[in-house]
Each structure stands twice: as C-alpha cells, then as structure tokens.
Amino acid sequence: MAGDTIDLATGNQNVKDYINGAIRQYLDMGVDAIRLDTVKHVERDELLEYVNNWKAHKPDLFVFGENLVKGTGWGSEIANDNASAVIRPWWYTRTTQDPSNPNGGGDSGFSVLDFSLFSTFRDNVTRGHFGGVGGIFSMDWVYGDATKLVTFFQNHDVGPDNDFKYRFGGEEANAAMVYNLLWTARGIPTLYYGEEIMFQAGLPQDIANANDTIDQTGRAYYGEHLENAGATQSHPLYQHIKRLNMIRSAVPALQKAPMSEVNEWGAGMSFVRDLSSEGSYAVVGLAAGGNQQINVSNVQNGTYTDAVSGETKQVSGGSFTFNVPAHSVRVWVLNGGGRSVIAVNT
C-alpha cells in the first residue's frame, strides 16, 4: 500500500462490520455510486463480498474501482503482459476462478476505470488519429459488462502524454476528437475538472519537486473559473461537450448498448450501438484530421436521422454510406428510436 495509507485487515469480521456499517450510512444519505481506489491491493473475492453487502442494502448502487495499469493490462495468462490477470482490471469485473478464461464466470457486478483504452491515447488521439483503439474494443469480451466501464481522457493521477505525468496540452481539435469517441463508444464517459476549458494545460498532474506549489500543477484551485461562469461556459470545448451530452442523453443506445461492427483505420472509425430491445439503434462514424467517407455493413434497414446535422438517409440492403467532416462525429439514429432525436451542430 501507499506509505500514507493504512493497510486494513479487510478479512477480519470486525473490520467488515465497521466498513459495511459506515458505507450503509452513506447509502442511506442518498449516495448512488462508490469509487474504490487501488483495488488490486484487495483480493477480488474479498472485495466482492463487500460490494455485494452494499448492493444488498441498495440494489441499484453502482460500484467501480481504480486499478491503474499503464498498458492494455489483459494479464499474462491471455496476452503479453508482465503480471497476472488476477491483479488486472478485467479480473475484478468477472467471477471466473481461471485467469486464462474470462468467460469461465459471469459479471461480478463491479466495474472499473478503463485504463486499457486510456493507455492508447498517448500514441493515437493525442497525435490526431484513432490507431489502436479498435484493438482495445475487440477485447471487450474479457469484461463482465464493458458498457459499464468508466472511460476518461485524463484524471488526477495521469495524463495522456508519453510519461502519463501531465495534463493534456495539445490541440483542442484532438481533445474534441477524444470526447467524440468517449461520448459515443461503450462505457460511461467522465471528465476531470477543468478539461472542458483546457485548465492548466500541459502542467504536471501533481507536485513533483520539493519546491513546487499546487498552483503550478493540474490540481490547482478552480474556483475563479466557477465565479466567472460566463467565460468558462463559452469555451469551445465546454460547448462541444455540452452538445455531446445532449446527443447522448437523447439516444439510449449510446448510453447502454454494446458495440458491434467495429471498424477502425486510424483516420477514422465506425461502429453500431444496438439497443433494439428498448427501441434504440444507432450507427456512429468518427473522423480524425481529415474528412472520411464511411461504409458500415450489416446494419438494420430503415430511415436514419443524424443527431448532429439533422440530415436524413434511407438505408436498404444492410449497407450504410455517409460522410464525416474532419474532427467530427455522425450519430445516425434509426427511425428516431428512443427519445426524440435532436440535431446539434458539432
């Protein structure tokens, strides 16, 4: 454990009783979700005993954890990795007892931060392309439920640059491209405070040297930007994310459906989000630095409306072709399924 963290005897019954009792008090106050830090320091089945206790008290509780890995992190049993899967993120989302066989057990009901996707960002989206993202999505099968992974571009510990040390300080267009991906792909997208205005861009995420002060880091005080809300909310990235939120909230498939027909070619990518069971189905196309003509096969036929531009297209024969401008996204919703589709220019 970290030098400033007490290593609790989490296997002892008196410790379990105390922690579970404390958590239940917070749940009774209205807490709906819990994030656990550094979960790899607690054996999975022991951790799940706690989580299941909390969920028995509040069945709709969402619990996820941080299991930091700088790399894809599938575990040495199923990929080229320097550690066993039993300390890797996916392991905590499954109940299998075999680290070489994720499908040997079902969904554990516990989710994790998606460090596997994040770890590619230093080599792709920060440099203006999607190369390697498709390979991450092709491994979604290892998780108990990939649609509940918590996705992010940066956080209080790490940034998307080569040494993971700094807040993103690159081009705003590339940041917008990342958010296009996170808000339309599977998972639950999250923001680290200030991302929406490139706050402290390029600065270290935390104090690194003896004479550093907080105001020189990514953890600096944000209050002035809250007090000047008008200027903050007028930032192009703030407005961009606001529009993406409107689209995501209007299309249930973007919130809950798994991904299928995933195709990634560096300069762009496409996929389907199929929640037909709830009347929502969407075809998504993403472009990096150049305009992309995209074709997606094996899609449902019908009338599609783009939630970004409002354009309408008729699809027959299961093949859909459309254009996506540079650094942009198109979300084609079948028959206006789910909530009403809104056209939002982005």
Image (tube, grey):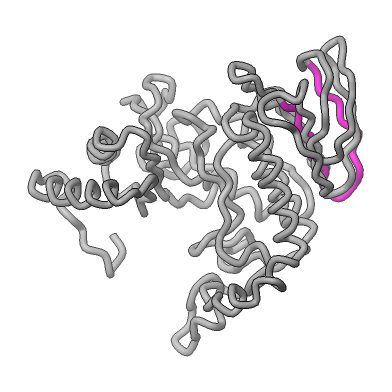
For residue 286: magenta? yes
Residue 197 appears in the rendering: yes
Q: Residue at x 71, y 47 (%)?
A: 244
Position of 132 relative to 192 (above/below): above
For residue 57: magenta? no
Q: Residue at x 59, y 35 (%)?
A: 255
Please state the horizontal and vertical placement of residue 235, each as a whole percent of the image: 74, 66
Residue 265 appears in the rendering: no
Position of 20 relative to 210 (above/below): above
Q: Residue at x 48, y 46 (%)?
A: 113
Q: Quadrant of residue 259?
A: top right
Position of 146 relative to 37 (above/below): above
Please state the horizontal and vertical placement of residue 214, each as a whole percent of the image: 49, 81
Instruction: Look at the image and give the residue range highlighted in magenta.
Output: 282-297
Which residue is nearer to you in this view: 171 or 304?
A: 304
Please state the horizontal and vertical placement of residue 165, each as a whole percent of the image: 56, 67
